Amino acid sequence: MGRTRTLLASVVVVTIGVSAPGSAQTREFSETVPLESGGSLQLEASKGSVTVTAWEREEVEIRARIEAPRAVSDDYARRAVDATTVDVTGTSRSVRVRSNYEGVPTRAGFWDWDSRTVPSIHYEIRAPRKLSLSVRSDRGPTSLAGFEGRIELDADRGEVDLRDLTGEIRLVIDRGQDSTLSVIRGSFDLEADRTNVRMREVRIEDDSRLDIDRGDAEIDLAAAQGLTLRTDLSRRADFDSELPLTLGSLNGRSFDGTINGGGPELFIESDRGSVRLTAAR
């Protein structure tokens, strides 16, 4: 396995190169780089799976498994794996991890001329608990756990599992199947399409927003949670609350109101789905 590392001042660049001819059609990547608590981590992943977990060290451990694409020849699978890289760049304050398919060859043939099929990359990453975390994932499950700070996730065509997150949480989930957010503290801005979302043990501490289309959402709140509620519901959307709701104004299927005397605003927008607020037991 070739490896190139370039050090420029405080900048770190790590790239995994090609493996030796005749290697198996999977390849492992492992690298650990410094990252201060309170720094930022950005991950750009496409096709595969993502697991990012917090720990107390001031460094990022990146492990990845590159798997050959299916339904291609053995020769093409080997060349595709060899050409795929995991790029790690940054400083001790900011680290970026990126799946790089730029070198994957095109396929020759009557039906797939000038097309290419890329390998899957399965990430397992550990990073400081206090962090500004940004993840973009595609075509695979995503799991984030244990972080405190600003958390951003853009997930497409994959189930999402978020656990024990505190801070400002911004999520875009498209075709996320049955996704789960558990033990959430702070604020959230969640946009979900063709996704069912189950939120457990949520404590809303700042203004938050839920926009869900073609899916159902259930939010499990503490019985004493105070909220100012504002909704924009289409005629094809349903809303229900186990927590006592005091209506302020009503306009068709949309309304304003308060729960437990009011508090941070929760704005709910829904079309072709249902939203239910439940009381934690």
Image (spheres, rainbow, N blue to C red):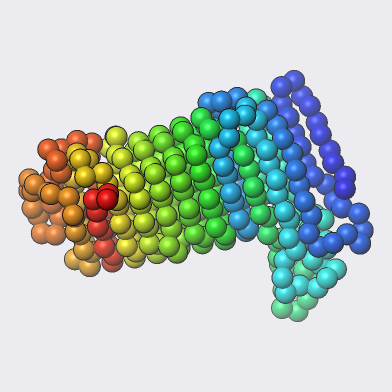
Question: Residue at 85% across / 51% down in the picture?
Answer: 18
Instruction: Give the vertical position of 143 relative to 120 (above or below).
Output: above
Question: Which x, y percent locates residue 90?
Answer: 67, 30
Question: Which x, y percent locates residue 270?
Answer: 27, 58
Instruction: Give the vertical position of 46 relative to 170 (above or below).
Output: below
The answer to whether any part of residue 47 appears in the image is yes
Question: Residue at 71% across / 22% down in the picture?
Answer: 10
Q: Residue lying farthest front? A: 281
Question: Residue at 29% across / 34% down in the picture?
Answer: 206
Question: Which x, y percent locates residue 153?
Answer: 48, 46
Q: Is residue 257 left or right of residue 123?
A: left
Question: Which x, y percent locates residue 49?
Answer: 60, 55
The answer to whether any part of residue 268 appears in the image is no
Quadrant for residue 217, please give it. Answer: bottom left
Q: Residue lying farthest bottom? A: 110
Instruction: Judge by depth and name the residue closer to the eye, 66 or 54.
Output: 54
